[in-house]
Image (spheres, rainbow, N blue to C red):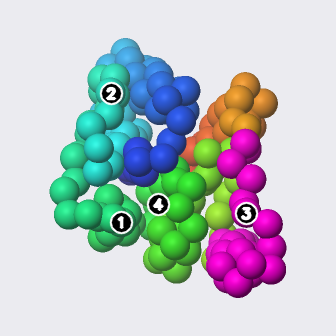
Amino acid sequence: MRLWADGDSLPAELRSLLCRRAASELARARGQGRQPAFDLCFVAAKALKVEAPASFVLIEGGPDAADRRILAEARPGDLVVTRDLPLAEGLAEAGVLVLNDRGEVFTLENVRERRSLRDRAAELRALGLAPESPRGRTWGQRELKAFADAFDRELTRLLKARP
C-alpha cells in the first residue's frame, strides 16, 4: 500500500507528521522481520524537504502536473492526502481513499458538492456579486490533531481491509 501526499500545498507540520508515521511503521516492521505495511511518497512541482523513509518525486510540466501523476499512479487501497478538490474528485471516482489536511474524508458525493460550491462562489466573485475569498484562513494545532486522528483511523481501516 502506498500513501501519496500532494506536497504542493500541504503544511510543513503535516509533512513532518506523515514522515514520522512512515518512520514508525518502518521501525516496527524491521523489528518484526517483515516488510512495512505502507510506504510514503510526496509528489510536488517544487522541491520539498522530506524526512526518510519517505520518497519524493519532483514533477515538471506546469500546473496540475503533480496531480496528474498522483491520479495516474494511485490505486484503490492507497491513501492520498490533498487539499485539491479536482484531484480529490478524480481519486474518489477511481475508488481511492482521500483525506484533506483537516482530516476530512473526501467521498465522491461530498467532494463534488464542495467543488460545485467553490466554483459557484468563484463565478459570483468574478461577476462582482460576492466579496473576495478571505485569505486569513487558519491552520494550526487543532487542525493538525484532527488530521492525525483521522489519518490513524483511516489507515488502520485500510490495513485491516487488506487480504
Please provide the residue range marked out in magenta.
Answer: 110-137
The spot of residue 66 in percent (x, y) is: 32, 59
Choose mark 4 or mark 1, whichever is in front.
1
Whichever of callouts 3 and 4 sits on the residue coming sooner in the sequence is: 4
Tell me where residue 60 appears, x and y as whole percent. Answer: 19, 57
Q: Position of residue 98 (x, y in %)?
A: 56, 59
Q: Is residue 105 above or below residue 95?
A: above
Farthest residue in the left direction? 60
Distance of mark 4 from mark 2, alpha carbons? 26 Å
Q: Secondary structure at mark 4?
A: loop
Residue, disc 2: 49
Give, as a three-letter code, the residue at label 1.
Asp
Q: Residue at x 48, y 47 (%)?
A: 9
Residue pictured at 71% horizontal, 75% vertical: 125
Q: Report crowding for label 4: few under 14, some 14 to 19, many 20 or more residues within 10 A (C-alpha).
A: some
Q: Which mark is residue 132?
A: 3
Secondary element type, mark 3: loop
Label 3 vs 1, first from the N-terminus: 1
Callout 2: few (<14), some (14-19), or many (20+) C-alpha neighbours within 10 Å?
A: few
Quarter assignment of residue 141? top right
Q: Distance of mark 3 from mark 4, alpha carbons? A: 38 Å
Residue 124 is covered by the magenta coloring: yes
In this rendering, the answer to whether 17 lies above or below 2 is: above
Tag in front: 4 or 2 = 2
- Magenta run includes residue 16: no
Q: Which residue is mark 4?
A: 77
Q: Which badge, 4 or 1, is on the more N-terminal residue?
A: 1
Task: Residue at 71%, 29% (x, y): give it.
Answer: 140
Q: Is residue 142 left or right of residue 63?
A: right
Q: Quadrant of residue 105?
A: bottom right
